[in-house]
Amino acid sequence: MLDALQVILILLFAPFLQGFIHQVKARLQGRRGASPWQPYREYRKLLGKDRLLSTSASPITRVAPVFIVGLLIAGCATLPALTSSAPLLAGGSFFVFLSLLAFARFATLMLGLDSGSAFAGMGAGRDLLFGVLTEPIVLLSLIAAGLQRAAFSFPSLLAVHASSDIWGKLPATLLVLIALLMVLIVETGRLPIDNPDTHLELTMIHEGLTLELTGRDLALIKWAAAIRQTLWFTLWLDVCLPVGIATTVAPGPLLVALLLWVGKCLLLGLVVAVLESLSAKMRIFLVPRYLSFALTLAVIAILADAAL
């Protein structure tokens, strides 16, 4: 029951978090900006439109959006947001969660390639390259965090934190924090890596995969992108700032955990919006260097765990 409640919470909150980031960016740029509730209006509008498919589209295009959302819903049940004691899917394993995200990425790539669009093919190639580079960083960062607390699943990681000091190994913790934040920017398609607010060829990566989608399919993919972003935010908070996670299923601690989770997500969204407003689009050939630096931080974090 608690798993279902958490999944519903993430699904409903994800569009608001997306709208909040857009509004903060607009305010920082001197514009009024749309309401944080705007994504909900856009999804409702898209759901009422007809589906138009490319002439080269196969049944993959018809089933992929629903399949992607389903994988991300399973990811919501794997990653703790409110409590570490919930009977989460597959025990909240690091590897199960990353596998679900990897399958969702693969389905998105297939969806883009199935349209036959040159822009989608370009975006798929870039997204696949970045995925190959980011996955080892995430895995090593989670291993480093697990070595700090001798736990390799999210519930056990949070349970250990509840009875110990997360800053006991400050250097390794800071390295993991920075490495995962750098990966979060890449995986959520944010500046300086990608620009989610444009469809220009030179800046398009994730958006290039969805150019041929309309109606319900586009609404599902946009919703999936918002869910994926919320999952990455929650992952970063679980590993780097697991303050306020409930250790029981009592209503009081769960309510406090809910308020703290929403507040931390909005605070991290504010940080991401500020970083985007201060950043210029990075040349795509410099992204591997950027990710190499994050990988170096993750490796040093593991070595710091062994040395301390």
Image (cartoon, rainbow, N blue to C red):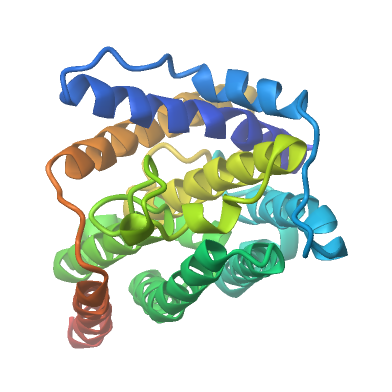
* Residue drawn 64% across the image and 49% down it: 76
Give percent across and percent down for residue 267. 30, 32
* Residue drawn 39% across the image and 69% down it: 149
Figure quadrant of residue 239: bottom left
- Res 163 visible: no
**In front of the other: 1 or 223:** 223
Vertical order, 289 against 34 (above or below): below
Give percent across and percent down for residue 10. 60, 36
- Res 300 visible: yes
Q: Is residue 221 left or right of residue 62?
A: left
Vertical order, 164 against 110 (above or below): above
Give percent across and percent down for residue 255. 55, 23
Figure quadrant of residue 262: top left
**Which quadrant would the N terminus be assigned to in this image?**
top right
Q: Which residue, as the protein is rendered here, is positioned at the far front?
A: 55
Vertical order, 24 against 196 (above or below): above
**In front of the other: 228 or 126:** 126
Q: Is residue 64 left or right of residue 300?
A: right
**Which quadrant would the C terminus be assigned to in this image?**
bottom left
Q: Is residue 168 left or right of residue 4?
A: left
**In front of the other: 278 or 266:** 278
**In front of the other: 4 or 63:** 63
